[in-house]
Image: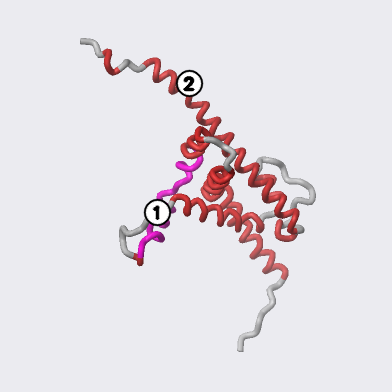
Amino acid sequence: MAENKKLSKGEIEKAREGQRQVAIKNLKGNIGNLASVYLIENSGQFGEAVGAAVEQFIYNPSLSMDEVREELKRSRQGGKRYSGTFNEYAYLENAYGIFQQSLPVLKLNDLYELMGSKARDGGDVYLLDMPEEKVQATVGMYQNHLMYSRVAKATGETAKKIPGDLEKLLTEEPKDSKKK
């Protein structure tokens, strides 16, 4: 009969650190971006213009062909090739689920850094070790920061495009005024 081996404090810390590193990678990459799109879409706070900007500058660049290909395969009916129905919203929900699972294994200073701030004294604590109400408040604040920073990025990129679009419009020759 196998004995239940208790993990040492060092082994537990090593496992937690491994989870934390995966979580940071998730939140810095496409998962974080797709989760922000999910949050923005479900907040009901932003209109069509912001939604279009978020789609163009956050959502579309975050879609990896490999990830989409795997999602298409998972959507197959009975494993039959070409029978799947890829659901964009379900894809966003999945990314948001991974995002939610990633947050608690972070340290407080990780969130500060993800928000572009410097580490704080006392911030070297895992969220999992904090009181539940503080974890919920902290996660809520991070989600708000993520949502608003991505909206700002998308609308800023849209604003940057306008002068170039205007230049194109003013320098293009109208189609019906071709010289004879």
Which residue position is annotated with label 2?
163
User: Mark 2 falls on what kind of element?
Assistant: helix
Q: Quadrant of the N terminus?
A: bottom right
Q: Cα distance, mark 1 to mark 2?
A: 36 Å
Residue at 66%, 57% in the rendered image: 104
Q: Nearer the viewer, residue 157 or 86?
A: 86
Q: Tell me which numbered mark, 1 or 2, is placed earlier along the sequence.
A: 1
Residue at 45%, 22% in the rendered image: 164
Instruction: Residue 26: give x, y in percent of width and height.
Output: 56, 52
Residue 29 seen in the figure? no
Would residue 67 be counted in the magenta stretch? yes
Q: Which mark is residue 86?
A: 1
Magenta segment: 57-77
Quarter of the image for residue 33 reads top right
Instruction: Residue 75: give x, y in percent of width and height.
Output: 40, 59
Instruction: Residue 119: give x, y in percent of width and height.
Output: 73, 45
Q: Nearer the viewer, residue 8 or 25?
A: 25
Quarter of the image for residue 73 reads bottom left
The vertical placement of 33 against 125, above or below, is above
